[in-house]
Amino acid sequence: MPEDNDNPYLVSCSAPVNIAVIKYWGKRDEDLILPINSSLSVTLHQDQLKTTTTVAVSRLFKEDRLWLNGKEEDITHPRLQSCLREIRRLARKRRNDGNPDSAGLSHKVHICSVNNFPTAAGLASSAAGFACLVYSLAQAFGVEGDLSGIARQGSGSACRSMYGGFVEWKMGSREDGKDSVAQQVEPESHWPELRILVLVASAKRKPIGSTSGMQTSVQTSLLLKHRAESVVPRRMDEMTEAIRRKDFPAFAELTMKDSNQFHASCLDTYPPIFYLSSVSQQVIHLVHRYNRHYGETRVAYSFDAGPNAVIFTSQQHVPEFVQVVQHFFPPDANGEDFIKGLPVTDAVLSEEL
Ligand code: DP6
């Protein structure tokens, strides 16, 4: 970074969302964001659902500032501060090691982040957002290496968006969280026939955010405790194996069962949390009817903390399933289509400038 230039130093990056097929729900450490179970996700294609972040660094800036979708946000939020602090700490370490790239460390940053999809509607916006923020800051300050442990401190699921393809977030066992990091299980090129459809049932903000929702679940749900201790460890192995073998029926069944158990844990939370809507339930029934019709599992659904469905299927079944969905959920009077994009799984973070 050129230190004596009055022009801001600019870096712009984008990061895609990821969809968990083995869900993360519950923390054992709220500050460090350490989960009660490992999780596994698929990172979407860069061109589909993504966050784009531009970081400007200048010695003329008086303070750090952040804009999200054009609106200034509070930069003093502890999670943002954790990410900024950690990146600056690593950059300082690099400079002490004699690396010249990390000049301008005392300079303030202006961060501008834009999503090309509804924010906080259960479409993993915080995952793409924090992954992108951490990656852009790292580029600006010349920091390299695995950054998933820093992205995790912004939002747990963000650590998985640091890699493309199929990604595991290991829960780790250390108290300092150093081993709670993301790792690629298979690259984006591994399963090119796999397709993901996003069915947008509602683009509204979710009534209960993931952070507070999972907090209440950890405090009150015995099902969640059972899930974390006795179900997920085995499912992680089975899912990894299904992905390795590209065994769609096994992958699909595990994906649907895990989504269902996550929502059952939400219902088991007291007071209960409902993320699925009647439209979500109709999608669930439709998928099971479709699979039953063919006598094999061709399509799977997964729902995060919102009513929007993520559909996994194979390339060859996309046209027919899209037709089926359009038949039962025709575009509304405004021409708004229920189906948004057909992302494929070959994304990694990329630098845009
Ligand atoms: C249902 O990562 O948004 O999408 O760590 O509190 O920021 P925080 O939560 P967040 O939770 C995501 C929950 C989920 C499941 C998943 O992505 O694994």
Image: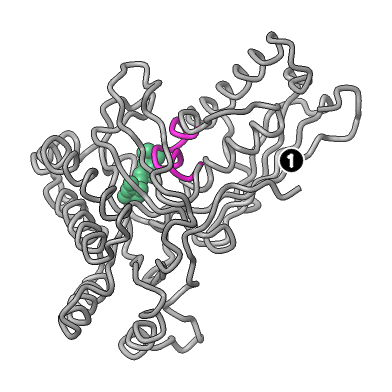
Per the image, the residue denoted by label 1 is 11
Camera-side residue of 142 and 166: 166
Secondary structure under badge 1?
strand
Q: Is residue 96 above or below residue 76?
A: above
View extreme (front): residue: 245
View extreme (top): residue: 96
Residue 79 in the image, given as x and y percentages of width and height: 48, 30
Q: Amino acid at mark 1?
A: Val
- In this orientation, does residue 209 appear? no
User: Which quarter of the figure has residue 183?
Assistant: top left
Left or right? Give the position of 146 relative to 212.
right
Residue 214 in the image, given as x and y percentages of width and height: 26, 41
Q: Quadrant holding ligand 1?
A: top left
The region drawn magenta spans: 151-162
Q: Is residue 127 above or below residue 144?
A: below
Left or right? Give the position of 254 relative to 159.
left
User: Which quarter of the figure has residue 324?
Assistant: bottom left
Residue 121 in the image, given as x and y percentages of width and height: 41, 58
Please check the rendered image and state whether residue 8 is part of the magenta-colored stretch, yes or no: no
Residue drawn at x 64%, y 48% is 350
Residue drawn at x 43%, y 76% is 339
Residue drawn at x 16%, y 42% is 234
User: Which quarter of the figure has residue 109?
Assistant: top right
Magenta-colored segment: predominant secondary structure: helix
Q: Is residue 335 above or below residue 305?
A: below
